[in-house]
Amino acid sequence: MAEATYPGQGAAIAFESPVLRCAGLTKTFGAATALDNVSFSVPRGRVVGLLGPNGSGKTTLIKLAAGLLTPTAGQVLVAGSEPGPQTKAFVSYLPERPYFSPSIKVARILDFFADFYADFDRPLAEDMLARLQVPPNIHMGALSKGTKEKVQLVLVMARRAMLYLLDEPIGGVDPATRDYILDTIIGAYRREATILLSTHLVADVERVLDDFIFLQYGTMVLHAPVAYVHETFGMSVDDYFRGAFRC
Ligand SMILES: Nc1ncnc2c1ncn2[C@@H]1O[C@H](COP(=O)(O)OP(=O)(O)OP(=O)(O)O)[C@@H](O)[C@H]1O
């Protein structure tokens, strides 16, 4: 079997396995079912939008793939392995909310990432932060909500990871910065890595997506290439999404 190694990963990973595979994936919280029997595979090099209304299970799915939650039933596999310390070495995860202490400086966080992740490309992170006009010597607490999100996204995307799991990466940033993030930070990773990103901003994100997964009430409604919706329904994914999930 062909194998490939990824920076920071240590061991060789089966190249032919899907980067992300869910089989009958189910997660309940007490009586609430957050994900119900979800199955799909994402091959290497795809940018996949995880779409769905509030409470449809997007964050739960991403946390399961990141190894922060364990399935109630079924399986999630990252490059053929259950999420754990081994997969965390090549999975770069952006949580829904910023988590850095307000008293820490941006440059210090870069130090932490450089120490912690062998695949962290510090010059790349510094370059992206400079383009976003974030000074390295500023404390996180002095940054606006949107700028904190930018810093966190830059850190996550400056890892040379195999799989990026991004939970609402552009929710809080202004439209002009969104374009930079989508075209330069996310669009540039096409074919080199796999990206699963959850978002409500379908119209903005659609142009950088290869595929999308629609969730509703914890079940998967559709997993298809973006081009499939354009060709089959003659509409954008955003229009399709609005029609399917109109209240
Ligand atoms: N820790 C938890 N305890 C109880 N219920 C939870 C927990 N986490 C999620 N849920 C429930 O699981 C369901 C899916 O939640 P999840 O956060 O995955 O949805 P989402 O699609 O990410 O929503 P949003 O778009 O609002 O961020 C919801 O009904 C939510 O209330």
Image (tube, helix red, strand yellow):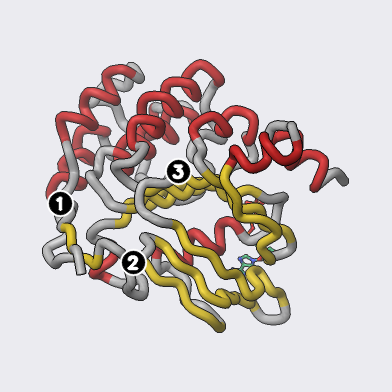
State which image quarter holds ligand 1: bottom right
Residue 99 appears in the picture as rendered: no
Q: Which of 195 and 27 is in front in this view?
A: 195
Give the secondary structure at mark 3: strand
Q: Distance between the residues labelled 2 and 3?
A: 17 Å
Type of amino acid under label 2: Ser
Residue at image location 59% in from the left, 56% down from the top: 58
Q: Is residue 205 left or right of residue 123?
A: right
Type of amino acid under label 1: Pro
Residue at mark 1: 7
Asked which quadrant contains residue 27, the reply is bottom right
Type of amino acid under label 3: Val
Residue that extends furthest to the right in the rendered view of this protein: 247
| Disc on the earlier residue, 2 or 1 | 1
Residue at mark 2: 17
Q: Where is residue 194 in the image (x, y as percent from the top left)?
A: 37, 48
In the rendered view, tell whether residue 54 sits above or below residue 181: below
Residue at mark 3: 47
Q: How far apart are marks 1 and 3 (CA)?
A: 20 Å
Residue at image location 75% in from the left, 38% down from the top: 233
Residue at image location 33% in from the left, 36% down from the top: 189
Q: Which of 247 and 145 is in front in this view?
A: 247
Figure disc tally: 3
Asked which quadrant contains residue 242, the reply is top right
Q: Where is residue 94 in the image (x, y as percent from the top left)?
A: 41, 48
In the rendered view, tell whether residue 70 sits above or below residue 140: below
| Disc on the earlier residue, 1 or 3 | 1
Mark 1 within 8 Å of ligand 1, using the beta carbon: no
In the rendered view, tell whether residue 164 sits above or below residue 79: above
